Amino acid sequence: MTQEEQNKEIARRFLGAVEAGDIDTIEALQAPECSWWIIGTGELSRESYTDAVKGMLLTASPRKVEIIGIIAEGDAVAAEVRSEMHFGERVYANEYHDLFVIRDGQIVHGREYFDTSKVAAFFGSQGDAA
């Protein structure tokens, strides 16, 4: 398996862990120095990002995360993703572009783009939903 294929598998595992609500795997796949950039929020530490994701995953059920496409070059993996998360009777659905930088089997940086108007419409002015 090439390094690019290994990196795509790590990204798939991370997104699968989001769908499953598997916080342990989400944490394990991030390097200690991992950082994130989220559209509308900016830079986040590993801890801040994980806390935001954890908050969403603990209240959303069921969850669906579907990878539409995934490509890799060098240590970068780009994934087009569609998600749907149920918060009681309300359903949050959005499309994402996630860029993962992966080194030594862990994510060292992530960038996440999505439709911010869908976040604002669903979550209001919170704007910190990852």
Image (tube, rainbow, N blue to C red):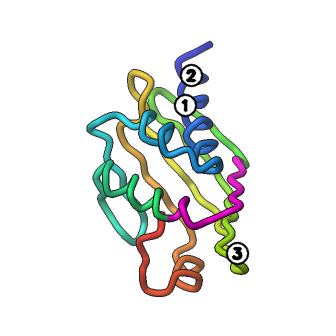
Residue 118 locus on image (x, y percent):
59, 78
C-alpha span from label 1 to label 3: 27 Å
Mark 1 or 3: the one toward you:
3
**Left or right of 120 on screen, residue 37:** left
Q: Which residue is mark 3?
A: 91
Mark 3 and mark 1 in contact (Cβ < 8 Å)?
Answer: no
Range drawn in magenta: 56-67
Q: Which residue is mark 1?
A: 10
Considering depth in this image, is 70 or 18 the residue closer to the camera?
Answer: 18
Mark 1 and mark 2 in contact (Cβ < 8 Å)?
Answer: yes
Residue 61 lies within the magenta run: yes
Residue 106 locus on image (x, y percent):
42, 30
Q: Which residue is mark 2?
A: 6
Residue 96 locus on image (x, y percent):
59, 59
SS at mark 2 in the image: helix
Give the residue type that dot 2 points to. Gln
Residue 114 locus on image (x, y percent):
55, 66
Give the residue type that dot 1 points to. Ile
In the picture shown, does residue 102 fall above or below 123? above
